[in-house]
Amino acid sequence: MDLSTRLSYLFGTEDHVGMRRQLVLLREKMKNHLHLMEKRNQYTICSGSLGEGLAYPQSDDDLMFCQTNIRVVTTYRESTERGDILMVPSEYSP
């Protein structure tokens, strides 16, 4: 069995993976719209294998929760609120 056939067997065809990815995006948009309607100050981004449509039963869920009511500034002078976050650029690569 060649690699392409094996991957299709494990994860589905390219069409299946694309369909799962679209379903994850749709669920994410609906959830974020509900949060907006409930006036929550956050939205969720699904990433990792689930976000790529490659998830299988043993996969974990990689979620990022983004707060919309927090400002990120790059200098102390820009800071106007106590809850502002100062972003300091790093000289080092991740």
Image: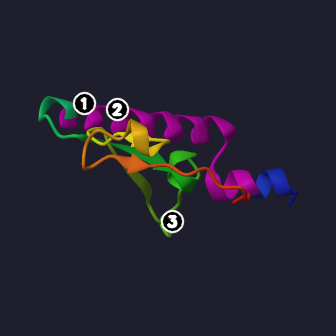
Q: Give me the residue at 57% from left, 55% from top.
A: 49
Which residue corresponds to mark 3? 59
Q: For the residue carrying disc 2, how many other residues have a C-alpha within 10 Å: few (<14), some (14-19), or many (20+)? A: some
Examine the image and state in which quarter residue 2 appears.
Answer: bottom right
Rendering coords of residue 4 (x, y %): 81, 50
| Quadrant of the drawing holding the C terminus | bottom right
Q: Give me the residue at 20% from left, 31% from top.
A: 36
Rendering coords of residue 78 (x, y %): 40, 36
Q: Say above or below: 37 vs 4.
A: above
Front position among marks 1 and 3:
1
**Disc 2 marks which amino acid?**
Lys
Residue 62 badge:
none
Q: For the residue carrying disc 1, how many other residues have a C-alpha within 10 Å: few (<14), some (14-19), or many (20+)? A: some
Q: Say above or below: 66 vs 18.
A: below
Q: Give me the residue at 55% from left, 54% from top.
A: 48
Rendering coords of residue 7 (x, y %): 73, 55
Please report the bounds of the magenta region as a residue range: 7-35
Which residue corresponds to mark 2? 29
Rendering coords of residue 60 (x, y %): 47, 66
Marks 3 and 2, how far apart at CA: 21 Å
Which residue corresponds to mark 1? 33
Q: Please name the predominant secondary structure of the magenta segment in the image.
A: helix
Marks 1 and 3, how far apart at CA: 26 Å
Residue 67 lies left or right of residue 61; in this view the side is left
